[in-house]
Amino acid sequence: MIYDCIVVGAGINGLATAHALLQQGVTSLAVLEQFSLGHGQGSSHGRSRITRSSYTSPKYVELMQLVHGRLWPQWEEEAGQPLLHPTPGLFFGPGMSQYFQSLQSVPAVLRHIEEICPEEARHRFFPFLFPDSPKVLVDHTCAVVAADRTVRFLARTLQDHILEDCQLQSIDSGPHLHLDTTRGPMACRKLVITAGPWTSRLLPQLQPNLRPAHQDVGYFQLDPAGNTGVGAFPVWVYAGSKADDSFYGLPEFERPGVKLARHRTGPHGDDPDRAIAEQLPEAAAHDLLQFAQKQWGSQVKLVGYDACIYTNTSNEDFILDHWPGDRRIVVGAGFSGHGFKFAPLTGQVLAQLALYGQTNVPEFERHRQHFSMAAAASW
Ligand SMILES: Cc1cc2nc3c(=O)[nH]c(=O)nc-3n(C[C@H](O)[C@H](O)[C@H](O)COP(=O)(O)OP(=O)(O)OC[C@H]3O[C@@H](n4cnc5c(N)ncnc54)[C@H](O)[C@@H]3O)c2cc1C
């Protein structure tokens, strides 16, 4: 059998792409996943993510306006449940001044942002202490994304198309694309590669551009009497005064504690096949606890741990393009630490690039060159 289209990887981007392909009428479709659906080795597991439209780059602002205004609501309607849960977003820390300044040039963002002093922020967002923040920005476009519910919704629509424990091992070009997989040979007319941190295993030429970086995530109980649930607690981003001194956090669905992690970017090149530790590594635990105590007081307690991985590009721009060696192959990669919120758009874009070579999304087409292979800067 020759499939019309095969998607490699059942993370959020592979699922979103396959879902969009189905909507475009492609039924001869397979999604190959090397592990089981919802596994914890990649980037898309876990219950929650942050979404926001405040970016300092106007292209992301424009794309997020489309995603928030139209595409997430369409998914929510189809899923029959809310997937975005609005909540204030806080941006603070001594390293934010550059970010604050850059936002001034993006009027579409400024409309939704309040700038407040730390005293007012402490009053409104107890128990945050904001010890080293000259000011705090409150972003009213933020929400908590119900990440695992989104993954499950998409997977339900693709039930008959997902092949688990099926690893793509090599690709041969011919009149059709011939795939060697751990479940035997397969063939297709179009191939979309959304393999997250494993992408450069399939396409080694992308190794200089795509750098996987492990992320350690802690869950902290704050004041046991305080409400830290979704809807009651903000999402937030902190920038310290040094590079790699950024943290972020958010409330979590159906799990005790507030999620807290360091935003680890840079040209790390970590191994995505690493064994995941049973508990938070000591250095990371120390790091996160110190940060948590500084922001929320000495009563905080570590109550849980998770591991995840980013696939970083040097400028954190995604790659959404045809593969130059064979235009029947489309690549969606380099989603860095901020790709989840864009999935309703990136799925649609990748599906349409595979089917038609271009998209009917003017907001993407206007900025398309920034997401091209040619623009993918090396580290
Ligand atoms: C801790 C953490 C917090 C984050 N927070 C946010 C946030 O708040 N907001 C936000 O927008 N984004 C956030 N992100 C980023 C976002 O989650 C990622 O950008 C997104 O999940 C990337 O998804 P993906 O589908 O591209 O990759 P993945 O989820 O890694 O999926 C790739 C899939 O491909 C499969 N695969 C790989 N190779 C093969 C092969 N050869 N054959 C078959 N299958 C294969 C893998 O097993 C995997 O399932 C966060 C990421 C992490 C790690």
Image: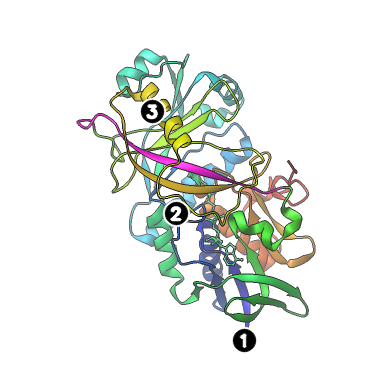
Q: Earlier in the sequence, mark 3 or mark 1?
A: 1
Q: Is residue 154 above or below residue 159?
A: above
Tell me, for residue 82, which label it has, or none. Answer: none
Q: Looking at this rendering, what residue extends furthest in the left direction?
A: 225
Q: Quadrant of residue 175?
A: bottom right
Is the shortest distance between ligand 1 and the CB of mark 2 under 8 Å? yes
* Nearest to viewer (mark 2 / mark 1): 2
- Please state which of residues 14 and 221 is positioned toward the viewer in this rendering: 221
**Quarter of the figure with the C terminus:** top right
**Quarter of the figure with the N terminus:** bottom right
Q: Which residue is mark 2?
A: 45
Q: Earlier in the sequence, mark 3 or mark 2?
A: 2
Task: Determine the CA span between mark 2 and mark 1.
Answer: 32 Å
Q: Label 2 is placed on what type of residue?
A: His
Confirm or deny contact between disc 2 and disc 1 (CB under 8 A): no
Q: Earlier in the sequence, mark 2 or mark 1?
A: 1
Q: Label 1 is placed on what type of residue?
A: Met
373 displayed left or right of 364:
right
Q: Residues within 10 Å of mark 1 (few under 14, many from 20)?
A: few
Q: Is residue 1 above or below residue 357?
A: below
Tell me, for residue 292, which label it has, or none. Answer: 3
Q: Is residue 117 above or below residue 40?
A: above
Magenta segment? 209-226
- Please state which of residues 25 and 160 is positioned toward the viewer in this rendering: 160
Residue for point 73% across, 58% down: 204
- Please state which of residues 12 and 36 is positioned toward the viewer in this rendering: 36
Task: Determine the CA span between mark 3 and mark 2.
Answer: 23 Å
Label 2 element class: loop
Q: Which residue is mark 1?
A: 1
Q: Quadrant of residue 45?
A: bottom left
* Nearest to viewer (mark 3 / mark 2): 3
Q: Main secondary structure of the magenta part?
A: strand
